[in-house]
Amino acid sequence: MNQQHNQQLQRINVVGASGSGKSTFSQKLSVILSIPHVEMDAIFWQPNWQESDDDTFFSKLSAEISPLSSWVLDGNYTRSIPIKWDKVDLVIWLDYSFTRTVFQAIRRAISRAWSQKELWAGTGNKETFRKLFSKDSIVLFTIKTHNKVRRKYELLMSDKSYSHIEFVRFRSRKESEDFLQQIRDRSNED
């Protein structure tokens, strides 16, 4: 990525399998670029782990990003592509190994269950050890969907209808951390 392109990074979507670290990476990137971070899970999830219907979700997502000239958006929600990729400049795919992603998902779930911190303000939603070992476990979800997410993004990256979007695929945390450091270094030069 050249310096001119770095200055044009205004709308970024960070995607990847559950547990890949999208939110953590996105928060770091938004701080470096001094642009808002928008977490799709916070828009999607309602109190008591209720999912938003598509009309509500799409409306909230549009209301969140439309007035902003720049943002780092983290989350997949493929059905929202017409909204989130309408003006996106860059899609960053955290495509870490199955083992790495599952390990991160387990570590995150245990940490969240232990801390009992509310995940998204106003929802009351918290991870629990009981949920961790249930059919609704985020770890089980990660195991079941990791390869499906990989196939989906491989197809989307090669889809000609998205040829106007720059895609970056990181296969390790080192690659993603090196990218953040490059952006940080370029930001410090400006």
Image (cartoon, helix red, strand yellow):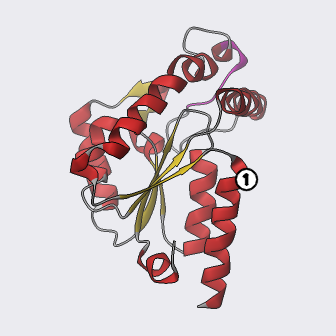
On whether residue 119 falls in the magenta region, the answer is no
Quadrant of residue 46 within the rendered picture: top left
Residue located at (65% from left, 65% from top): 180
* Side of 188 relative to 47 (left or right): right
Residue at 46%, 43% in the rendered image:
75
Q: Which residues are magenta?
A: 125-130
At a point 43% along the width and 45% down the height, the residue shown is 40
Where is residue 186? Give x, y as percent: 61, 81
For residue 57, say whether it is visible. no
* Count of marks, rendered view: 1
- Chief secondary structure of the magenta portion: loop
| Residue 84, horizontal then vertical, whole percent | 31, 52
Question: x, y percentage for residue 134?
Answer: 61, 9
Q: Amino acid at mark 1?
A: Lys
Q: Is residue 151 left or right of residue 131?
A: left
Residue 129: which quarter of the image? top right
Observer-nearest of 62 and 95: 95
In the displayed orientation, state which residue is furthest to the bottom: 190
Residue nearer the viewer, 158 or 124: 158
Q: Quadrant of the C terminus?
A: bottom right
At mark 1, the secondary structure is: helix
Which residue does the image show at 71% across and 27% down from the upper left? 99
Disc 1 target residue: 174
